[in-house]
Amino acid sequence: MDMLQRKVYLILILILSLCLFNSCLVSEDGTVVFNGKVVDPSGVGISSVKVKVDCIFENKEIETDLNGNYTFQLAHGGTAFLLFSKDGYVPQSKTFAFEDGETVTYTQKLEIFQDEVAFLQNITRK
């Protein structure tokens, strides 16, 4: 291999490396913000609901605050699967597609397990 070919290969490797490096970088402009609330059937916020976030580039699990609010950020746009769960409630899931820099606001209602409803009704009747 002559000197010119080596320089061309070196330049190509450098360009390829820069392209791969830049695709891994996340700018602040690309950050996606999710926020919302998890409520019961009457619209009251539910505390300590687990919100599991699964997407190709990032996975996390958070919990709602005392008023049922949640917020989290993802590095960039794409698709995410959210699972909302808490003991005594029917788990719910939602899939989102979103763009870089987008803010997503979503309220999720969780229904009480029917066995829990019957149990609570029996307690209040006595």
Image (cartoon, helix red, strand yellow):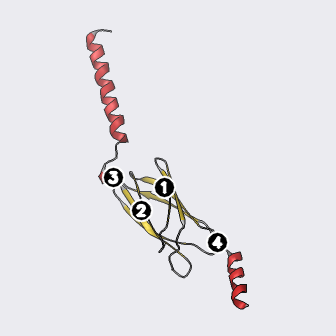
Element under disc 4: loop
Q: CA distance from mark 3 to mark 1?
A: 15 Å
Q: CA distance from mark 2 to mark 4?
A: 25 Å
Question: Residue tagged by mark 3?
Answer: 30
Query: Which badge, 3 or 1, is on the more N-terminal residue?
Result: 3
Where is residue 69 shown, x and y percent of the image? 45, 70
Q: Amino acid at mark 3?
A: Gly
Element under disc 3: helix
Contact between labelled residues 4 and 1, with CB atoms less than 8 Å apart: no
Name which quarter of the figure residue 110 lies in.
bottom right
Q: Where is 122 relative to 21, above or below?
A: below
List the single residue furthest toward the bottom: 125
Q: Label 4: how many residues lie within 10 Å, few (<14), some (14-19) or many (20+)? A: some
Residue 105 lies left or right of residue 11; in this view the side is right
Element under disc 1: strand
* Residue lying at 50% horizontally and 76% vertically, measured from the top left: 45
Q: Amino acid at mark 4?
A: Gly
Q: CA distance from mark 4 to mark 3?
A: 37 Å
Question: Residue tagged by mark 1?
Answer: 80
Question: Residue tagged by mark 2?
Answer: 34
Query: Which badge, 1 or 2, is on the more N-terminal residue?
Result: 2
Contact between labelled residues 2 and 1, with CB atoms less than 8 Å apart: yes
Q: Amino acid at mark 2?
A: Phe
